[in-house]
Image (cartoon, grey):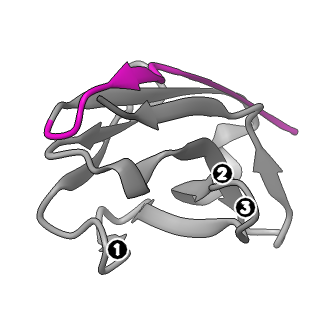
Amino acid sequence: QVQLVESGGGLVQPGGSLRLSCVCSGTIFKIHTMGWYRQAPGKQRELVASIHTGGSTNYADSVKGRFTISRDNTQNTVYLQMKSLKPEDTAVYYCNAALYDRSSYWGQGTQVTVSS
């Protein structure tokens, strides 16, 4: 099993920045992709960004050029650096781990609110 704990959410003004962190523990050697998803009220959960074990990254069109996903293998942590935040980025952000056995794990989520 894999345990994921997110942190770093909060209230920020439009144009501001936040960095989300996701600390992983458990059978992390079985993970092939880490991802950040978000879910706004009344909307479906959507992929924001992902990073593969090999280092390749993928971003939703809506966040390209503003968000950066990265990882620190020494700390077993995945980050989501968010810049130029917009009100439409407001959502609960979830960390996800996808394993080679096709299982998937989620963190508890962290709220990001972009408002003046």
| Residue found at the far bottom of this picture | 61
Q: Considering only order in the chain, which callout, 2 or 1, is on the residue closer to the N terminus?
A: 1
Q: CA distance from mark 3 to mark 2?
A: 10 Å
What secondary structure prevails in the magenta region? strand
Q: Residues within 10 Å of mark 2 (few under 14, many from 20)?
A: many
Q: Give the residue at x 25% y 42%.
A: 82
Point out the stretch of residues depicted in magenta. Answer: 1-15
Task: Indicate whether residue 3 is drawn in magenta.
Answer: yes
Please, is residue 72 above or below residue 71 in the view?
Answer: above
Q: Nearer the viewer, residue 11 or 21?
A: 11
Name the residue carrying label 3: 99
Q: CA distance from mark 1 to mark 3?
A: 17 Å
Name the residue carrying label 2: 96
Total label count? 3
Please, is residue 84 above or below residue 24 in the view?
Answer: below
Q: Amino acid at mark 1?
A: Asn
Residue 74, can we see it? no
Looking at the rendered image, the quarter that the C terminus falls into is: top left
Q: Residues within 10 Å of mark 3 (few under 14, many from 20)?
A: some
Q: Badges 1 and 2: C-beta atoms under 8 Å apart?
A: no
Query: SS for tag 2?
Result: strand
Q: Amino acid at mark 2?
A: Asn
Q: Nearer the viewer, residue 98 or 88?
A: 88
Q: Badges 3 and 2: C-beta atoms under 8 Å apart?
A: no
Looking at the rendered image, the quarter that the N terminus falls into is: top right
Q: Quadrant of residue 88?
A: bottom left
Query: SS for tag 3?
Result: strand
Name the residue carrying label 1: 58
Q: Nearer the viewer, mark 1 or mark 3?
A: 1
Q: Return the x and y of residue 24 as percentages of the image width and height.
A: 62, 29
